[in-house]
Amino acid sequence: MAQFDDLRALSQDEVVTHSLVRDVPLSGGKTLALITLDNGRDHTRPSTLGPLTLLEFGETLAALKDRAAEGEIAAVAVTGKPFVLAAGADLSKVGDIPDRATAKHLAQLGHQALGALGDLGVPSFVFINGLALGGGLEIGLNADYRTVDRSVAGIALPEVSLGMIPGWGGAWLLPNLIGIENALKVIVENPLKNRMLKGQDAFDLGIADAIFDSVNFLEDSIAWADDVLSGEIKVKRPNEPGKIERAVKWDVAVGIARKSLESKIGTVAKSPYAALDLIKAAKNTDKATGFAAEDEALANLVSGDQFQASIYAFNLVQKRAKRPAGAPDKALARPVTKVGVIGAGLMASQFALLFVRRLKVPVIITDLDQARVDKGVEYIHNEIDTLLGKKRISPDEANRLKALVTGTTDKAEFADCDWVIEAVFEELEVKQQVFADVEKYISETAVLATNTSSLSVEQIGAKLDHPERLVGFHFFNPVAVMPLVEVVKAPSTDVATLSTAMVTAAGLYKNAVITTDTPGFVVNRILAKVLGEAMHAVDTGTPFEVVEESTKPFGLPMTPFQLLELVGLKVGAHVLDTHHAAFPDRFFESQNLHKLAELGHIFERDSKGKVKGIDKKARDIVAGGTTPMTAVELQTRIEDGLADEIHRMLESNVVAAPEDIDLCLILGARYPFQMGGATPYLDRVGASERVFGDTFHHPPIRGAE
């Protein structure tokens, strides 16, 4: 097919997922042609769908269509190699697409290859035996019938989180299969929350028509397909939209979804809104029209800036995060067989719960008195019961985890701990004292970890006999959810301690980035820059609303003032004070922020907690400024300030590279993939050139518009 020669040229090194065909005898002398998708690699490389794969799949289906016309086969089915149907498009190939015309060809090739499943002249089936993401799931959606393995944990259309849309049929087929509200959840809501469906979810929604256990999944699926062909099974789909849903609910549901998106993520990201437009149009268009609309939308997005930034972000999370820069040899890590947690408050209890769940080793907590200790242990036990109630763990596991958690006021019981982490007040003297106390009881090789967010790790260890065993281990809230840990290497931290910290982070299912011991490390230093500029602006006369407007082009998940209320105004004031003390020429102090902290809030809310606007008392606190800025002026000021600060951080080796800055912001501050972090954006808008006469990336990565 000469139409796709441009795609062939881009794909010479593609790891091709082959379409392997075998005939399976059915009852009554019928034959099922079974295609198994297999890239010839083991489970470490899931099958993906690049241009050469799609061309081969299309050619295979064309040959089977001819066989069906000759009466040789009664049906066609598709499944995957063990544990994987397909993990979607080969993003390494999509990311290489140079222009819109080539991007449109990729969309058309996907529709042509996968769409052939609906035009074979015989029924088509897809047996979802494992991971089915993006184009992998769209293989199933293009078929007539689907079964799913009950144990499958990853079924999703994640495209909008990557700056794309489900462009090989998903945006049109899914709402017409499972109804508008279900489709909005799968196509828009779940990707933005990084959620996937399990096998049972797919069956309950009506994506799959039958569900079977793993042990005989393929055999049961083939037998089920045989019964469908013979007429013994009539497939019913209760979630398929009817006339009333199309006439009444469809546009309303899309409208509600649009307003919800605007309130939660703003309007910078293009892909979610492009998906909404396609889903809305799917109400009353035929398949050919729907597919053509997907071609145009996918071509626009893949050839645009946001997709390039998304691919950069995706590669950071999938590759760089798994090979942290500067990480010592894992073999140097000391075993962690028991964990001690200093503190029994909410944060400390969350630490204890995470360590016991992930490492499955004894965890002991301590505090000033037994009442606090008992309260902390009770909290952890209650959280374990909650996990049990949600069927996230078994009764046996719940009992084992509870038995591993103990509390004490006697530090001598920390003697056999290999890892001790503190979660006490963010005050230097307090942290110094608790570590100096506990060091009297623990072995010389036990690691001490501090969760400080802005204090000097070196100063925290100033009173230790063995400061080489101290490391920063900065979690983000909520502890169980946020995937980042900043591992802070103080000047004295030895290699064994650093290796132990990195291996422990991996054991907790966290991504770790190594930073030097500097105020705010990475995430809080950058957030402090933005928050400081925001408070300086209102202090000098810029209205709150103008400040919020100035940051909308960044595409961040919340405005500076929403973030301040989330982390706590007192915490925000402390963070700004810390940075002003360290860098008084670049970080502002704000007495008004301390006054807002005393007030307790910035926004006025109704009885249900919904924001009504800026509280009048908050306005009164900051009144008096005489040099207001426009939103554009402030936007430029913040951009230049960030470019300067990040450049300084890299010059002083806070982290190894700009990629580590962006990885921290994506994983620790929820920067959207469409932004690619901060540095691609700052390059694209010219802030890097304005500030230091160069760019962070060579060539610059196209970033979010």
Image: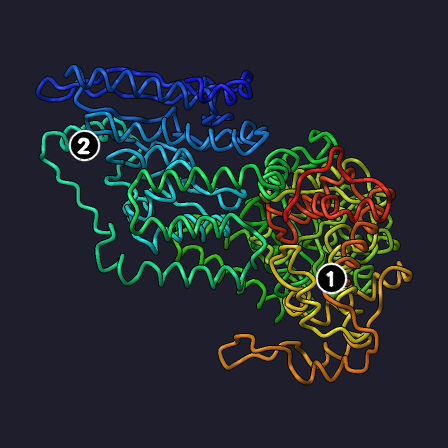
Query: Mark 2 and mark 1: span between their CA atoms?
Result: 62 Å
Q: Is residue 544 above or below residue 673?
A: below
**Callout 2 amino acid:** Trp
How would you rate the neighbour count of disc 1 (Cα within 10 Å): few for under 14, some for 14-19, many for 20 or more?
some
Is 665 left, or right, of 254 in this rendering? right
Residue occupied by mark 1: 632
Residue found at x 47% / y 29%: 106
Classify residue 635 as left or right of residue 154: right
x 20%, y 24%: residue: 75
Q: Position of residue 538 (x, y in %)?
A: 76, 73
**Which numbered mark, 2 or 1, is in the foreground of this view?**
1
- The residue lying toward the viewer, choosing from 87 and 308, is 308
Image point (23%, 30%), residue name: 221
* 428 or 552, nearer to the observer: 552
Task: Residue 452: tell me if it is visible.
Answer: no
State the mark number for residue 607: none
